[in-house]
Image: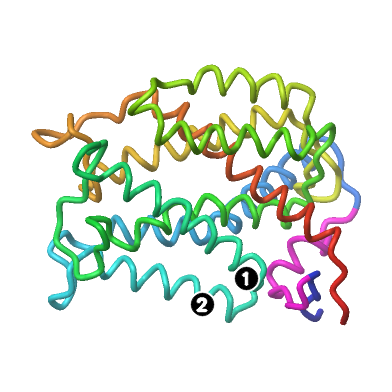
């Protein structure tokens, strides 16, 4: 078995080739099929979450005092860069995927700078770091990149196909509105529920076909948005518990992140998905000579 070439000229790891192309159990039925598909679904999910999983494990194990005199936030940046480099080197991530993840890093970091600014202070990073820019540690952009990484990897590993996708310009407009509302709601009111209603109508007929093992399965895309948003909300609770960042109501003592943040994360997933979908749409329309 040899690595498989991708559209951007890179090659996939043997692990990805095996997960996507190898069917060691032959024809299966009944409870055996359920178990095998469930197992493969879990393995592919874990593989798609590899960057996010390793990064958040680092958040848990790096002590608040840092390592060898290096502040915690700086250590987390070093770890994030090391994970990213390792994934590219091992062919677990292609260069096109890395460039797209870099875009998510920039988008997320810009939001972080605004949200932590003196006049807003939606949350804060209380610890010292050499790699803080405008009060935001550089590693923070990787938390948004982790979401983008998951969607990009899952798209490939599960051979995702989207049915009844809305017009790209309409989806793009909703994504822009979602991102803009994160900024503007501090000045002109929070319109997330109006935007969510637009997204609900836009994606109401949209379904996603995915392949856990050897058969296609289908689910509403909106369900995927909500589920991913929920797991991000759980990760956010764990991160704030370990003091990576703090909301104003958590400064005295930790408390559960408000459930309303689930809706914010779900909308962020919609925006992230739209960026990935548009990048893939553009890629299909560009001829790259070999």
Cα separation between marks 2 and 1: 8 Å
Q: Which residues are magenta?
A: 8-26
* Badge 2: residue crowd in 10 Å (few <14, some 14–19, many ≥20): few
Label 1 near label 2: C-beta < 8 Å?
yes
Q: Percent x, y for residue 194?
A: 55, 17
- Pick the front one: 40 or 57: 57
User: Position of 162 compared to 146: left or right?
Assistant: right
Q: Which residue is mark 1?
A: 92
> What's the residue at 12%, 64% (across, down)?
65
The tag earlier along the polypeptide, 2 or 1, is 2
Label 2 SS: helix
Q: In the rendered view, would you say 91 is above or below 55?
A: below
Name the quadrant containing residue 252.
top left
Q: Is residue 117 magenta?
A: no
User: Position of 143 compared to 175: left or right?
Assistant: left
Q: Quadrant of the C terminus?
A: bottom right
User: Position of 163 compared to 198: left or right?
Assistant: right
Q: Percent x, y for residue 110?
A: 40, 52
Q: Which residue is mark 2?
A: 86
Q: In the rendered view, would you say 221 is above or below 204?
A: below
């Amino acid at each position: 078995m040899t690595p498989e070439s991708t559209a951007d000229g890179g090659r996939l790891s043997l692990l990805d080739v095996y997960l996507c192309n190898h069917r060691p159990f032959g024809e299966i039925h009944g409870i055996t099929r359920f178990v095998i598909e469930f197992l493969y679904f879990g393995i592919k999910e874990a593989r798609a979450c590899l960057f996010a999983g390793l990064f958040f494990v680092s958040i848990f194990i790096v002590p608040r005092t840092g390592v060898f005199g290096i502040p915690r936030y700086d250590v987390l940046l070093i770890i994030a860069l090391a994970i990213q480099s390792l994934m590219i080197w091992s062919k677990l991530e292609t260069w096109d995927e890395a460039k797209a993840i870099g875009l998510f890093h920039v988008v997320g970091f810009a939001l972080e700078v605004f949200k932590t600014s003196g006049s807003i202070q939606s949350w804060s990073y209380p610890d010292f770091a050499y790699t803080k820019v405008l009060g935001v540690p550089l590693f923070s952009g990787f938390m948004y990149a982790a979401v983008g990484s998951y969607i990009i990897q899952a798209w490939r590993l599960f051979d995702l196909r989207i049915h009844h996708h809305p017009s790209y310009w309409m989806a793009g407009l909703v994504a822009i509105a979602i991102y803009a509302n994160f900024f503007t709601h501090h000045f002109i009111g929070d319109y997330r529920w109006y935007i969510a209603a637009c997204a609900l109508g836009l994606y109401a007929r949209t379904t996603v076909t995915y392949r856990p093992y050897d058969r296609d399965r289908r689910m509403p895309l909106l369900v995927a948005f909500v589920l991913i948003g929920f797991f991000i909300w759980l990760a956010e609770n764990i991160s704030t518990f370990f003091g990576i960042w703090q909301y104003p109501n958590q400064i005295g003592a930790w408390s559960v992140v408000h459930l309303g943040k689930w809706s914010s994360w779900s909308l962020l997933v919609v925006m992230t998905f739209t960026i990935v979908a548009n990048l893939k749409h553009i890629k299909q329309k560009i001829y790259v000579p070999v």
